[in-house]
Amino acid sequence: MESKKKAPIGVFDSGVGGLTVVREMARQLPEENIVYFGDTARVPYGSKSQHTIIRFSEQIIRFLKTKQVKAIVIACNTASALALETVRDEFGIPILGVVIPGARAAVEATQNLKVGVVGTDATVQSGVYTKIIKGMNPDIEVIEKACPLFVPLVEEGFKEHNVTQEIIDYYLESMKNSEIDAMILGCTHYPLLRSKIRAYMGERIQIVNPAYETAMDLKKLLASHNMENDGGTYPFSHYEFYVSDAAEKFRRFANTVMPFDISQTNVVNIEEY
Ligand code: DGL
């Protein structure tokens, strides 16, 4: 059991988006070690079929298991929405997604029972957020909107570019004019545009980032399995970063998101897993 406590948490996403979840995990579970995988060769997931997203997720989980992870966080809404149910019981370790924690946070946040969800095409088409939110409270009305161009804008570091403002306007105008009072950032890339989205949507609408709830769910899950790392390594917890392509570009980007410097990112041939 002792070795399990010190084992890292595996975290993955299609690219840099999952770093928004790692950043929150670093705040809420600073003593935990993390192995991150960003599938930079195959991003975006949001335009792919469920079959492909399940295959990619299985390969990544097999890779993370070679790192002896004690639990896995799917820090990607698309993979959580389309693959979690399939992979959850396949690998003999606890696997957690971001959709249920995000849905719960929105159910708690809304006062007028009208919730917006923005995400990738695949996430929105799956209807998973609506299903889970309505399962928690059938009286809540859910409006979902796919914003596929947000992911490449984030991956390219275009946050401050004029075109980003125009695309926010294009995608979110109908949300802004609806009666929602809470909106889930249902893609882990979107919190990296949060200040722009917040400024556009105004103060009336609460912006929900599922990362905090996910970190808290992970905390509970580790406690229930008696797997928390109580080794006291903070602030020197060990983080490793792997990608399927363009390691140096990822590393530079990650350094703008994470509260500490990442000195190394390694490339993995993920198709081998
Ligand atoms: N960041 C991911 C998500 O949360 C996927 C974005 C993409 O690859 O399309 O959905």
Image (cartoon, rainbow, N blue to C red):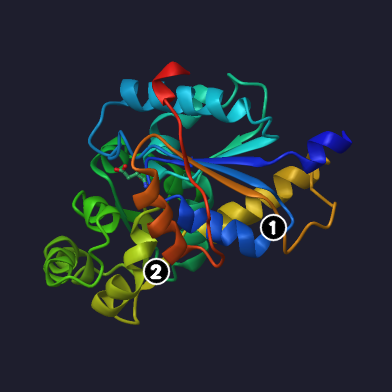
Q: Position of residue 22 (x, y in %)?
A: 54, 54
Give the structural element (helix, strand or loop) at label 1.
loop
Q: Position of residue 112 (x, y in %)?
A: 39, 69
Residue at 23%, 42% in the rendered image: 121
Q: Which mark is residue 29?
A: 1
* Whether residue 187 is visible: no
The answer to whether 50 is drawn above or below residue 111 in the figure is above
28 vs 128, left or right, is right
Q: Which residue is mark 2?
A: 207
Label 2 packing within 10 angstroms: few (<14), some (14-19), many (20+)? many
Of badges 2 and 1, the one in the foreground is 1
User: Relative to the observer, which residue lies in front, 169 or 189?
Assistant: 189
Residue at the outermost right position: 2
Q: Is residue 178 above or below residue 186?
A: below
Quadrant in the rendering for residue 92: top right
Residue 215, percent from left and from top: 61, 54
* Nearer to the camera, 61 or 210: 61
Q: Secondary structure at mark 2?
A: strand
Query: How far is disc 2 from disc 1 in space, using C-alphas?
Result: 23 Å
**Residue drawn at x 38%, y 58% as measured from the top left:** 253
Residue 251's label in the rendered image is: none
Question: Could you say which is closer to the camera, residue 18 or residue 239?
Answer: 239
**Mark 2 or 1, nearer chain start:** 1
**Horizontal side, residue 17 vs residue 264: left or right:** left
Residue 191: quadrant of the picture: bottom left
Residue 93 showing in the rendered view: yes
Q: Residue drawn 25% across and 30% down?
A: 48
Instruction: Tell me which amino acid carries mark 2.
Output: Ile
Residue type, mark 1 in image? Leu
* Picture coordinates of residue 131, whole percent (x, y): 40, 41
Vertical order, 23 against 7 (above or below)? below
